[in-house]
Image (tube, coloured by chain):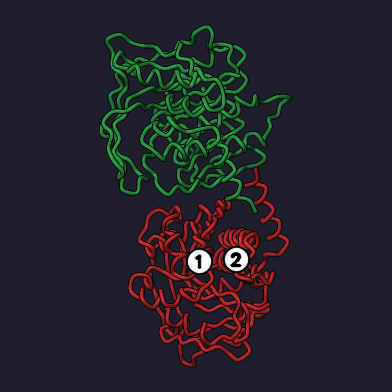
Chain colours: A green, B red
Amino acid sequence: MSLIVVGSVAYDGVETPHGKVDRMLGGAATYIALSAAYFTDVKIVAVVGDDFAQKDVDLLLSRKIDLAGLERVAGGKTFFWAGKYSPDMNDRETLRTDLNVFAEFDPKLPEAYKSAPYLFLGNIQPELQRSVRSQMNGVRLTGGDTMNYWIADFRAQLLQTLKQWDFLLINDSEARQLSGEHNLRRAAAKILDLGPHTLIVKRGEYGAILFRRDCHFMVPGYLLEDVFDPTGAGDCFAGGFIGYLSGQGISPRDGGIDVAALRRAVIYGSVMGSFCCEKFGVDRFRTLTREEIEARYQEFKTCTAF
Amino acid sequence: MSLIVVGSVAYDGVETPHGKVDRMLGGAATYIALSAAYFTDVKIVAVVGDDFAQKDVDLLLSRKIDLAGLERVAGGKTFFWAGKYSPDMNDRETLRTDLNVFAEFDPKLPEAYKSAPYLFLGNIQPELQRSVRSQMNGVRLTGGDTMNYWIADFRAQLLQTLKQWDFLLINDSEARQLSGEHNLRRAAAKILDLGPHTLIVKRGEYGAILFRRDCHFMVPGYLLEDVFDPTGAGDCFAGGFIGYLSGQGISPRDGGIDVAALRRAVIYGSVMGSFCCEKFGVDRFRTLTREEIEARYQEFKTCTAF
């Protein structure tokens, strides 16, 4: 089974109480792909400039990530973002956003991508997300992310786009903004009327909740002793979630979906998000093994069973 | 098995986005006792003035709560607290605190209380908590609560008091203040060096974590559709936790304790805290049944199992 991941590939400058890195590989599609690649075959759709370094290409290729859809704009520069976290790392301030080649991103799927059964649409303009979905034939499970900017200023397009999704994966403040409800249970009920049969609400250090019309599933956040850099943790959650479903071949059939598999996917998402925070940027994924992932999945069981 | 509960019995004035009540039964010992009484025999140690209403006495007696230790000060007035919650109910402002007879509270245990095996020391001056413990003979499990004021200004006395406790049950900001560590896992490790073998950290809507030296157990918060009044929810958590342990006769034996029972106690605590928020003050406990409690316990299982 293979998974298409669409979104940003970028360079980030990040400062946390544990240190500062001026420029390192980042971007939502990068984190999602690196995380999902532990579970399934991943094909990236993104754009970079000709400053995109060979060592970063090599890292992605080492995880067998297909880069046929990684467009390179000659003479262009890769998207750059810089931010600084608060002392408790619950807030961050954006210091710089240079969209560069990302400003003109118009995702075109290579032929070989179009028949893939799994699609994750990272946080980009809703119309572009819709365009990618329409280029595919035979997609079995579609989901994605969005953000406050699209919810506020591109609401009509976003609502149109969401109609075609199986799941939406956003954080709690986005769920509140999209639904106009502060209470998460009410917010979820409204969002599930917009199209997706499944909503996953990420709550940062407090874990995540999966909502469906007839049930919900809650997982607390993994308790890390040290959070070095939370950048990308939500994207790694998304990668673990959709990566696991793709690797297991889970999709709606006969009008239903395997809810137990969705629950396990939320745990794998939580596991991958927690690993992401243990080092700067994507560094944890340079050494992380599938065995460590399974051990942490078991730890989640041990810490939550009663 | 019977449980001694020490703390405040009070009248509260509360305003939330759902309404306003000028004067109603409140106080930590009241909430703890009403909650614990679903699981075990409860004996209260507290003080009130002669304004304490017969209907409130009757409510406590209807739950078979022993009031032999409820001192009445002739000519005195009962502790009064008033507060107003923020629109999202995550913060509250204290509008009035009249300690009244509570200012001179010096708990004396009736003879019939002294041999009880379970003791919960609500949030009062640490020296008074220690005095109660020393009046008991044969206590098998002692735990309690404290607050920012005692942690900051009565630290030495609090540390002396904690040495004799089996468990400490506080919220996350108190755990951070007591330990000087922001990270909860590190905070817990330091607190478990102070005496208690078990620490329970309440995280409000985000649930709770039980810490022991060799393991921890996390439970997410119950997702309510409406929170009418969060006053007393933490105390009802405490009542469910210690009440369940007392009702089951759980205490350390042969140097160990039944950790599976502690986990179940955390769930019962969470269940009782969630019910508390569904109506103003203690009102939910006027109608709550043991069957509803068991149903919500099962709901916790359904919403967290994978």
Name the outermost residue toward the front.
B254
Q: Classify A227 as above or below A76.
A: below
The residue that mark 2 highlights is B241
Q: Quadrant of residue A56?
A: top left
Q: Are marks 1 and 2 in contact (CB under 8 Å)?
A: yes
Q: Secondary structure at mark 2?
A: helix
Front in this rendered view, residue A220 or A284? A284
Query: What's the amino acid at mark 2?
Result: Phe
What residue appears at the point 43 percent right and 54 percent down from the top-left corner? Answer: B87
Query: In the image, residue A206 lies at what x, y percent?
Result: 48, 47
Query: What's the amino acid at mark 1?
Result: Leu
Q: Residues within 10 Å of mark 2 (few under 14, many from 20)?
A: many
Q: Residues within 10 Å of mark 1 (few under 14, many from 20)?
A: many
Q: Quadrant of residue A16?
A: top left
Q: Which of the numbered marks, if any, corresponds to residue B169? A: 1
Q: Classify A239 as above or below B112.
A: above
Side of A123 where A166 appears, left or right: right
Query: In the image, residue B107 lies at what x, y percent?
Result: 50, 86
Front in this rendered view, residue A91 or B166? B166
Label 1 chain ID: B
Q: Secondary structure at mark 1?
A: strand
